[in-house]
Image: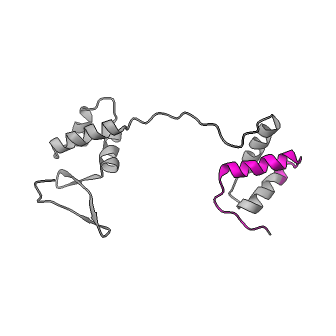
């Protein structure tokens, strides 16, 4: 039995499919060999067949083409603008903050505050998360936060 290769790059698996397809090996046998070497969940039979058809129709590139995804609404400039608003008034509701940014959803504003800026709400104030030794410290009485 062959040694199982864990976490191979997708292009490497496609290169194996391309190689075996060039040797006129059937997709079912290719799938079996890919699973033997890369593990059972490495690639589905339908995906092997899809790549096999593409290579048969003349595709030579084993790398996937870049795809344009939906552009992110979250930009460094937006994060900075939200941080400025937070520092102006720490006693705010996400809904109130979202009103200052009409082109951004309330959920996105909340995600920026909690994930990008790492703030959390303590005693009706938004304060930065502070970590020391893996524990969170809450600064409830500090005026400088």
Between 42 and 131, the one lying in front of the other is 131
Q: Is residue 36 visible?
A: yes
| Residue at the extreme top of the image, as rendered | 103
The x, y position of residue 62, in whole percent, is 71, 43
Above-or-below relation of 21 to 105: below
The x, y position of residue 41, in whole percent, is 68, 57
110 left or right of 23 in image: left
Above-or-below relation of 57 to 39: above
Q: Is residue 27 visible?
A: no
Looking at the image, which residue is at 79% across and 39% down? 55
The x, y position of residue 79, in whole percent, is 31, 40
Span highlighted in magenta in the image: 2-29
7 left or right of 143 in image: right
Looking at the image, which residue is at 31% across and 36% down? 78
Looking at the image, which residue is at 26% across and 53% down? 120
Above-or-below relation of 131 to 143: below
In the rendered view, how is the structure colored?
A: one colour
Q: How many marks?
A: 0
Looking at the image, which residue is at 78% across and 53% down? 31
The x, y position of residue 126, in whole percent, is 21, 50
- On whether residue 81 falls in the magenta region, the answer is no
- On whether residue 13 falls in the magenta region, the answer is yes
The N terminus - image quarter:
bottom right
Between 94 and 79, the one lying in front of the other is 79
90 left or right of 80 in image: left
């Amino acid at each position: 039995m062959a040694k199982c290769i864990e976490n191979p790059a997708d292009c490497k698996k496609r290169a194996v499919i391309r190689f075996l397809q060039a040797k006129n090996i059937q997709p079912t046998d290719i799938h079996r060999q890919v699973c033997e070497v890369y593990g059972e969940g490495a690639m589905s039979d339908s995906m092997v067949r899809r790549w096999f058809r593409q290579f048969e129709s003349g595709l030579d590139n084993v790398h996937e083409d870049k795809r344009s995804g939906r552009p992110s609404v979250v930009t460094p400039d937006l994060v900075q603008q939200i941080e400025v608003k937070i520092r102006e008034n720490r006693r705010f509701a996400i809904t109130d903050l979202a009103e200052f940014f009409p082109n951004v959803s309330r959920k996105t504003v909340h995600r920026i505050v909690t994930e990008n800026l790492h703030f959390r709400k303590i005693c009706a104030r938004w304060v930065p998360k502070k970590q020391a030794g893996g524990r969170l410290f809450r600064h409830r009485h500090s005026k400088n936060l």
